[in-house]
Amino acid sequence: MRGKIISVEGIEGAGKSTVIQFLVDFLRQRGHTVVSTREPGGTPLAENIRHLLLQTDMTESITPETELLLMFAARAQHIQHVVKPALQAGKWVVSDRFVDASYAYQGGGRQVDYQRIAWLDTWIVADCQPEIVFLLDIEPALGLARAKNRPGSQDRIELEKEIFFTQVRAAYLQRAHENPTRFCIIDATQTPAQVCAAIARRLEML
Ligand code: Z5A
């Protein structure tokens, strides 16, 4: 038996963290063993790469290419050490972001050529693709306003301007339209209860 991957995507403040616990609980109640993880991160080395990627006190700017390659370096560790072993053991993997974030942020936001991302995707992710990608869709102005209300300081990517998140959102939506069976777009302006209900409806179809 092979488990499945479910990822949750969206721009800053879309409400991913809020729905992930619901998703995990829902799957566990249906008898699945679930591994809850995140990208970039999920292993000690990948979490170190995450820290490098998100820190704000760098004396040197990170190029879009470096950012992309670090995302995939973290992903390679995550897939080999967490995702594949879980799937092989029949577990389900719920990931707070996965490969589609690279198309949206590095492709849409940083304008890295999609073909380069697709090449890395084929190499590193291969058949470890999510069964469902829940895309929590929200206008950047609203997402950023929500995120600003949270405690804690903003990371390097969160400090980007609204136009960056507009490009990221457009890339996510384009990817969703290109992959309609895999993606499930959820209106993230709804209440948390309505968002979770929409997620449950899609999971019931599995
Ligand atoms: N990144 C990348 O560039 N390339 C890649 O390949 C990958 C990632 C994998 C870290 O990700 C960064 O890495 C991320 C993309 C980049 N940078 N950015 N931006 P992350 O997922 O850890 O970080 P994040 O996007 O900053 O997550 P977030 O801001 O925590 O988003 P969220 O989880 O969607 O938000 P939330 O904490 O659940 O909700 C935000 C607030 O809104 C909070 O106060 C909630 O109580 C509130 N909220 C949530 N839902 C609702 C609803 N429905 N109504 C009203 N209020 C709500």
Image (cartoon, grey):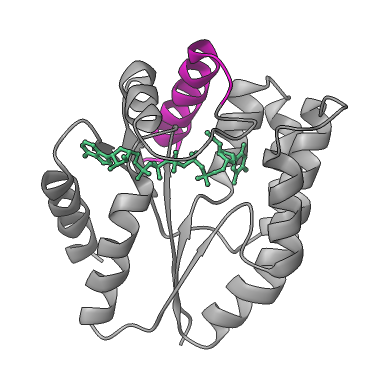
Left or right position of 189 against 76 = left
Ligand 1, image quadrant it occupies: top left
Residue at 17% x, 65% y: name it. Answer: 204
Displayed quadrant of residue 94: bottom left
> Considering the image in quadrants, where does the C terminus appear?
bottom left
Magenta residues, start to end: 159-180
Rendering coords of residue 61 (x, y %)? 83, 24
Q: Is residue 176 visible?
A: yes
Q: Position of residue 184 (x, y in %)?
A: 31, 44
The answer to whether any part of residue 123 appears in the image is no
Of residues 178 and 173, the one nearer the viewer is: 173
Magenta stretch, main secondary structure class: helix
Residue 176 drawn above or below residue 96:
above
Q: Identify the residue shown where x is 45% and y is 33%.
A: 178
Question: Which residue is located at x 39 percent, y 20 percent?
Answer: 140
Compared across the picture, whether 186 is left or right of 70 comes to left
- Residue furthest out toward the right: 60
